[in-house]
Image (spheres, grey):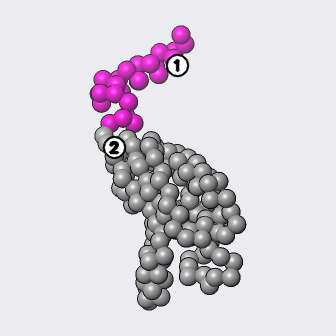
Amino acid sequence: MTDTDVSVTKESAAAVRRGGGDPGTRGRTTIADGVVEKIAALAARDVVGVHAMGSGLSRTFGAVRDRVPGGKPPVTRGVKAEVGEKQTALDLEIVVDYGVAIADVARAVRENVVAAVERMAGLEVVEVNIAVGDVKLPDEEDEETEPRIQ
C-alpha cells in the first residue's frame, strides 16, 4: 500500500464511524404517485401508435379545462400509479391510431414505461395494465389540444 491508499482507507473508516455507514444510504427517499404518473405518461406518449392518453370522457373534460384561461393540459391524464417504498403498479388508458397492431403498441408502451420508471425513480414496476379506450380514425376530428412530440 502507498501513503495515498492508507490515507483514503483511514478517511473511509472515519466516515463510516462518524455517520454509521455510506452517506448515500442515510435517510429515506419517497416518490409521490404524481411523479411516477408523469414519467409513465411521457414514456407512453413516446410510443408510435399511441394517439392520446385517457378515456373519451376525461379527454372531453380536459379539452374544456384546457380552453379556460390559465388552464394547462394535465400531463398525467390516463395514468394511475400506486407507489410503495420499492415497487409500483400502473394503470394506463390509451387511444391508439387506426391501423396499428394494438398488441404490439401495448407491448411497446409497457417496455418504455417500465424502462423509464425503473431508471428514473428506481422503483420496481410490478405491472403495467393497459386499457385501450378508443381508436383514432384518420378522418375523425382531433379532440386533443396538447402537442404530440415524437
Disc marking residue 85: 2
Instruction: Report x, y in % for residue 55.
Output: 47, 71
Instruction: Report x, y in % for residue 19.
Output: 30, 30
Kind of residue at disc 2: Glu
Q: Residue at the spot x=52%, y=48% of the render?
A: 114
**Secondary structure of the magenta portion, mostly?**
helix
- Classify mark 1: helix, strand or loop: helix
The magenta segment is 1-26
Foreground residue, 25 or 97? 97
Q: Residue at the spot x=41%, y=23% of the render?
A: 12
In the displayed structure, 90 sits above or below 12; it is below
Foreground residue, 37 or 9? 37
Kind of residue at disc 1: Thr
Which quadrant: the C terminus? Answer: bottom right
Q: Is residue 2 magenta?
A: yes
User: Quick check: 94 left or right of 97?
Assistant: left
